[in-house]
Image: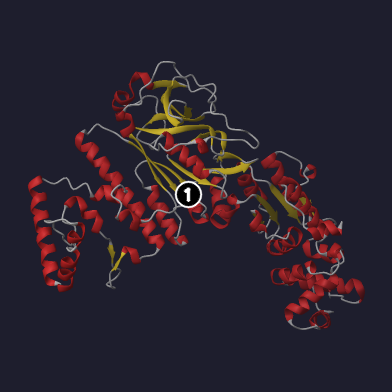
Amino acid sequence: MGILLSKLRIKNFRSIESLSIDLGLSNLLIGQNNTGKSNFLRAINIAVGGVTDVSDSDIFVASGERLERTKTAVIDTMFQPTDEQGSIANEFSDFWISVFTTDWIGTDGGSAFVGIRTEIKYDITKDSYIINRRFIQQWGESTDAAQIPNKKSVYNEQMRSLLVSFYMDANRDIVQDLRNKKSYFGRVTSNYNMPENKIKEIEKQLSNVNAMIIESIPTLQQTKERISAIWETIGATSSNVEIAPLARKISDLNKGMDIVMQENGAASFPIMQQGSGTRSWISFLTLSAFVDNQNAKLKADDNEAEQYVMLTMEEPEAHLHPQAQRQLFSQISKFTGQKIVSTHSPSIVAQSVLADTIYFKKRGGKTTAIRYQASGDDDKIGREVINTRADIIFATAVILCEGITEEVALPIFFQGYFKHAPYSLGVSIIGIGGQNYKTYLSLIKNFDTPWFIFSDGENKTISAVKTAVNEVFNMDYKNLSNIVIIENDDDYEKHLIREGYKEAIIAAICGHEEDAEFFESYIKQMNGQKGKGGVPRNYEGDAGREQALEDLCNRHKAEYALPVARQIVSSDDKNKRIPAKIKSLFAELAQKLGLPISTDEEDAK
């Protein structure tokens, strides 16, 4: 049996005013930059990982608030026993009972748990912030409702050594680890554990090899003699200087150690000449070796002993291409212990289990987090959304539209309206390729992401929107201002023609085809030819020309969408640069997200 950090509560820590989250064996933190994922990981490493450098900057301060020294940050951790399958069990093993003792073990809903409260508080005697730990007798519904005994509780050295958290940030680099004896690589390579006589024998041979190198290279011998003159300068009478091409002592081997890589018989290169992605990857692999080494040592001392191990890691995808990201995440998944990993990579999200994801966002400058709630549609969501459009879960807001035409055109109009590209404001515009709104909305609802729909006015499409909104949100689409539907049973192209953009569309098509007479030639060529149902086309008169334009647009939806949108937004008439329905959509988005409207739009009003 093992144990798991199953619940975490944080209060008044950095950007987190109050947060409570359930944790599993694997946890993937997602969300935009600056939403509090790093603060969340730091809180865990203060509570579990032995981090001791705390200060007033770790205390949450609201806008306009003056920090009082009586204010305390609280991090509550609940550890529960697990069975062989990793599920929560009722009782701790005998080993963990001996570690925690009955002083620390409580019960919550019939299951045993150990709750540890970590406080970051100001100590007037030390004139600095300190870390204080107490055990939690009753977990309660919140940090304020938890019952903490008045008697002093001891967080002893054994508990500290058996509850271990390893943190790796996005800047990990094996080249730096090679020279750092305290790094995971340095700690593994320093664990030589050899008999004393063997150490002396090796160190003697190292000294001999060093002497042979110096004697064989005259310039080194000359350099040694010149350096020896330093003693005359400082007035020493009997001293010695040695140049050591190689480490002379086993304990110093890490100072000259290197990793050399050779691929398929090619020339070998030291790790310093490898790319940042490879160096970062190897740094993680050395941590895995260190953890396995520590577990082996623990079992060698006591076969019944157990150790809780947690990996907290930021952006494992740094410097790696998508395929390598997938491979690395596969290796992370096999890491021995509980894992809490933050990422901005759609490739990693697509490879993960949806139920493992925790979505972070900021509201009013405060970090919030939502764990994905598993449902019967997870496989479908993963297959139809995550595998192809995983970027949706990193969005500040999502606009769903009918197909490729709108997906291509709406970003152009968005730029014209807001003077910013959608992605720069965190907005994802997604053509769902049909009428599968429900799958997308189910995922969006789970992460409480603001959403909008821009839909064609055709009856079958409206029916699909109505059904999806009702099934996912139990609401009538007609009452929702974030759903904008084109009127008169029109699709996007027909709507633009009705709204008076006929000449702009013709100009865009002719410009794209590099033929000023392209549209007229199309009418001459196709007029009278059989159309839908075998009925001859009639492109005579104004109504006929509009029908010809609609038919031409429908034949080349994806091809003409971009030039048509660009032609419209470049109009000399400010009132005509954004079609009315699209303008309504953007106005609603601006209002709900608090986005500024461009000067052009204000002038157009």
Q: x, y percentage for residue 527?
A: 84, 79
Q: x, y percentage for residue 358?
A: 53, 42
- The residue at the point 73 percent across, 47 percent down is 594
Would you say 217 lies left or right of 81 here?
left
Tag 1 residue = 352
Residue 431 in sight in this render: no
Would you say 1 lies left or right of 301 here?
right
Would you say 147 lies left or right of 263 here?
right
> Quarter of the image holding residue 432?
bottom right
> Quarter of the image holding residue 487?
bottom right
Q: x, y percentage for residue 383?
A: 54, 53
Q: Where is the C terminus found, in terms of image quarters?
A: bottom right
Residue 545 in sight in this render: yes
Q: Please, what is the three-letter code of the amino acid marked with disc 1?
A: Ser
> With respect to residue 209, does 142 lie above or below?
above
Name the secondary structure under disc 1. Answer: loop
Would you say 599 lies left or right of 311 here?
right
**Circle 1 crowding by C-alpha within 10 Å: few under 14, some 14–19, many from 20:** many
Q: Where is the N terminus found, in terms of image quarters?
A: top left
